[in-house]
Amino acid sequence: MIELENLTKDFGPHRAVDSLNFSVAKGEVLGFLGPNGAGKSTTMRMLTGFIAPSFGTARICGFDIQAAPVAAKSHIGYLPEGAPAWPDMSAEAFLKFAAAARGLSKAEIKPQLARAVEATNLGKVLRQPIGSLSKGFKRRVGLAQALLHDPDVLIMDEPTDGLDPNQKHEVRDLIRAMAGDKAIVISTHILEEVEAVCSRAVVIAAGKIVADETPQELEARSHRHNGVWVTLSADADQAKSVLAALPDVAGVEAEPGGSRLFCRSTDKRSIAGAVAAALREHGLSFEEMHVERGRLDDVFRAITRHDADETPGQSAMARETEGALR
C-alpha cells in the first residue's frame, strides 16, 4: 500500500534523504524513527505530496504521488507535525471544511464527522474555537481530520505529541483498532510508542536506513538482551562473586545500595536458569528476578549516532558497542 523506491531529497548541496527503499503492507503499523535532522519529516512530506523528491518514487496504493497526485492523496489520511488549523474556526467547522475539501458529499459528511469525533473523543469541544483548545485537543482535531474519509493509508507525524497519559492510551487503542485494514506509518521520537503499537520499525540516520526490523528484533540487539535482574535479600557481595564466576555471565553490575544486581549474558542466550541455580546452590535467597528484553533506547543511540566523516553505525559510540550489537 506504500512503496518507496530510491526516494531522495536534496536541499542545495545537502542531501536530507538518501535513496530510501521500503514498503508497508496492509495491516502493518510502521514506526519511522530517527534523531532530529535525520530526514523523517522530509520523507513524510514527500510521501504525502507536500514536496517533490529530487530522485526516486513514492507510490500510495499503486498511484505515483507525483504522476497521479489526486488519486494517491485520496487514499491518504495525514496528520502533520503540529497539526496546523485555523484558530478562529470551531473544531466542528474545521472538520466540515476538511470533509468538503476531501470531496465528501453533504450526505456523507454527517456520519463520517460523527465517526471521527467519536473515535477521537472530541464531542465536548466540538463548538469551541480551535485557538482556545489545549495542545492535546488541537492534536485530536488534527487526528480527526485525517480519519474523516476512512483512508487506506494513515501517515502520522508525532500522533501523541502534547497528549496526557490517558489521551495517549486512547490514541494507541485507536491505532491498534484501525491497523487491521490500513497501512499506518508513525513518525515519532518516543520509543515507548514503537513498543506499544508498531509491528515494525524503520530507523534512519543522516537520511539513510540503518535498521528495518520488528521492535522485538531491535530489542534483541541490545547488550542487555536476556540479562537478568536479581533483587537479593542479603549477601549481595557474595552473590556478585558467585554470579560473576558463571561461564555464561559476561559481567555483574550492582545498583547503588548493592541489593539489586544485573547479570549480563555472554552471548545474549538465556541465563535465568543458571543464575537461579547458582544462587540456590550457595544458599543465597533472592526476592525477585526478571529477564531483560533489551532497551530500544540503547540500540537507537548506538545505530544513529555518528560523526560527520563516518558512516552510520561506525561512530565511536557504535564501535564501543559493536560487540553488543552483533
Image: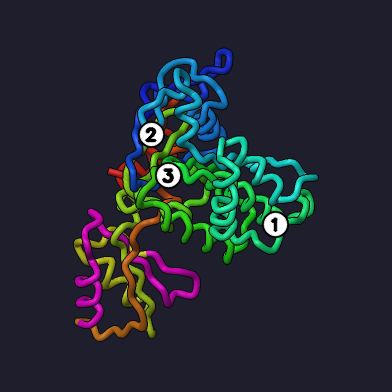
Chain-order first, disc 1 or disc 2: 2
Q: Quadrant of residue 272?
A: bottom left
Residue 276 in the image: state x and y as whole percent.
24, 76
Q: Is residue 226 above or below residue 202?
A: below
Neighbour class for label 3 at 10 Å: few (<14), some, many (≥20)?
many
In front: 79, or 33?
79
Bin the neighbour count of mark 2 within 10 Å (Cα to Cα): few under 14, some 14-19, many 20 and up.
Answer: many
How far apart, in angstroms, are the residues tagged by discs 1 and 3?
26 Å
Q: Residue at x 39, y 40 (%)?
A: 202
Taking 87 as reference, is 146 left or right?
A: left
Q: Residue furthest front?
A: 107
Q: Is residue 235 visible?
A: no
Tag 3, which secondary structure?
strand
The structure residue drawn at horizontal position 80% and vertical position 45%, both measured from the top left corner, is 88
Most foreground residue, 50 or 286: 50
Cα separation, mark 2 vs mark 3, equals: 9 Å
Q: Which residue is mark 1?
A: 126
SS of the residue at dot 2? strand
| Residue position marked by numbered label 3 in the rendering | 184
Which stretch is magenta? Answer: 253-280
**Residue identifier under label 2:** 2
- In the rendered image, residue 164, in percent from the top left (x then y), is placed at 62, 62
Say if the magenta span includes residue 271. yes
Pointers 1 and 3 in contact (C-beta within 8 Å): no
Residue 144's disc is: none
Question: In the visual, does 190 lie left or right of 24?
Answer: right
| Spatial CA span between label 1 and label 2 | 33 Å
Q: Relative to 263, does residue 55 appear above or below in the rendering?
A: above
Image colouring: rainbow
Q: Is residue 16 magenta?
A: no
